[in-house]
Structures are given as structure tokens and as C-alpha cells.
Amino acid sequence: MTVAMGTIKAGEPVFYVVDEHEHPEGSSTQLGFWIYLMSDCLIFAILFAVYGVLGGRYAAGPAPKDLFDLSLVAVNTSFLLLSSLTYGFAMLSMQQNRVGAMQAWLVVTGLFGLAFLGIELTEFAHMIHEGATPQRSAFLSSFFTLVGTHGLHVTFGLVWLVTLMVQVKRFGLIEANRRRLVCLSMFWHFLDVIWIGVFTFVYLMGTLR
Amino acid sequence: MSSDVHAHADAHGLADDHAGTRSGQLIGFGLSVVLTAIPFLLVMSGSFDKQVTALIIMAFAAVQVVVHMIFFLHMNTKAEGGWSMMALIFTIIMVVIALSGSLWVMHHLTTNMMPVHEMGSTP
């Protein structure tokens, strides 16, 4: 920005910004949301670090090999990946102003998200039923914290998705709704990126251990 | 790719940056499927040495994160005047410090502080 120095009164410099600033509403939302995602990334980094440190402390309890069903995790992973793709299609439909197609893709995305959560909760319930509760060992505490935090993010992503679908239905594809949909798209793809870390470091590496 | 109606949004790179193209989405998805399937197959078949498999799946995960960043999150050096990339680089540095630092320090702590009667009583 250009700063000019005016000398209106002799000896008393006045500083002011020459070029007029224009801040249309929402112009900084995307960068702000990206920075939020980066801070979320740091939360997950710390949870990964905790899992990395504690992931081998079984306290004579069950180990990953006894608990994880990799084929179930593979199905789960494909659901989340497919939901990322369908959300991408929803964004393309939004760009072409095809509201119906966009809502349909959002429904598909939501269903994949629900399927993901359903499988994850089934897995958790199965583990807890077998006595592999978060209190059992440091490994299980850190496992439930990390994977559970990701699951909570997906849950809130779904709540947000439904909210936005209602918003679009009521108000149409107005500028504000477009902005919100772009933010949710970033959030949703970001969760998929975190899941890459989860299935690699928790499930695959855990099974290798 | 974009409509004239949203010229305002385009001026700020809003609508364009985060939708990409259909082929871009499909390429990203295809790459992700391959990059996910191979690690799962390697681990489930157990055909390689554990150390080798671990290194391979970590490399695949790193590549897949980059694929997601480019094809799904549409990261580039120009978005938001380069500030998105700046924030990302900063985050990566923080993540690397936090992860490697924690693992390194705690590994040494474990090897040096392990009680003599370590079996069964470790937390």
C-alpha cells in the first residue's frame, strides 16, 4: 500500500493511505477458513504425535493386530474418498448454477459420510464390546482420541452439510451460500487428507507392528 | 468454466479456485484409489518385509496427501496472493517439528527411563 506524507500544517506530518481500500463482504473468508484448517491440522498433528508415542503401550491388553479389521477400514476409506469426489461434483454443479444437480450430489456426499460414520461407530462398538475400551491401555486411549476426533469432525461436517442444503433450498445459490459451500468443500476434503494419515499410521502401521 | 453472473466472485478468485474441472476431479480420484489400494494390498498380503512395507506405505501416504492438495483442495502458489501456500508451509514446519520432536524425545525417554521390572507394569 502506498503511504503518502502530507504537510498540511507546517512541521506536523500527516500520514494517510492513498489508495482506497475495498473489502467486499466475504473477500477474506477463504483465507481465514484456510488458516482455521491449518490450525485444525496442528490439533491432529499433536494427536498423531500422542498416538506415535503411546501407540505401542498395550498394557498387556489387545494390540492393533487383534482389533483392526483391515477390509472394513478399506471399505470405510473408499466411502470417504467417494464422498470427496461427489462433493467435488457438487461444486462443479454449483459453478454451472445447476441447483438440483448440486443438491443431489450433496445428498450423495452426505450418505457416504453417514456410511463412513456408521462403519466407524460399529467398529468402536465392537471393540468396546470386546473389552478394548479407551481406559484399557494407553494405546487404546490415544487411538480413540485420534480416530474419535476425526469422526467428530465428520459428524459436524454432516450437520453443516444439511444446514447448507436447507439454506440453498430456502435462499438459492446466493453469494453467501456459495461462499459457505466453498468453505465446507475445503473442510470436507481436508478431513479426507487427515484420514489418509489415520489409515496409514494407525491402521496399516498398527497392523504391521 | 465460470459464468459472467459471478464476475464479482471471479475477481477475487472465489468461484474458480475451488471447483476445478471434472477431469481434474476424476484424475485426483483415480490417483487416490491407486495410492490407497496399493498400501492396503501390501499390508493385507504381507508379501514384503515389515520395514520395507512401512516405508512404502508412508511414501504412498505422502504422495496421496499432495494429490489431494492439488486435485481436491486446488492448492497452488497463487491462491490468495500466495498466503494460502505460506500458511500451509508454516503448518508443515510446525507439524514436522511437533511430530519428529515428540517421537524423538519420547523415544529417548522410554529407552533411558524404563523401570527394571518393565514387564506388565508399564503404563
Image (cartoon, coloured by chain):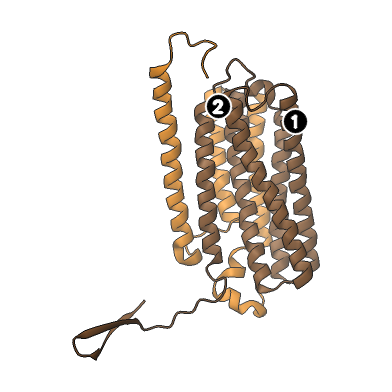
Which disc is residue A125 wearing? 1
Task: Identify the subunit bearing mark 2.
Answer: A
Q: Which of marks 2 and 1 is nearer the N terminus?
A: 2
The residue carrying mark 2 is A55
Task: Identify the subunit bearing mark 1.
Answer: A
* Distance in Å between CA atoms under marks 2 and 1: 20 Å
* B82 left or right, relative to B23: left
Residue A129 seen from this side: yes
Say what amino acid the circle numbered 1 marks.
Ala
Badge 1 marks a residue whose secondary structure is helix
Which color has been applied to chain A in this rendered view? brown
Q: Quadrant of the C terminus of chain A?
A: top right
Nearest the eye: A129 or B45: A129
- Eyeballing the image, is B58 above or below A175? above
Residue B1 seen from this side: no
Q: Where does the image place residue A42, in percent across and percent down from the top left?
A: 50, 45
Which color has been applied to chain B in this rendered view? orange
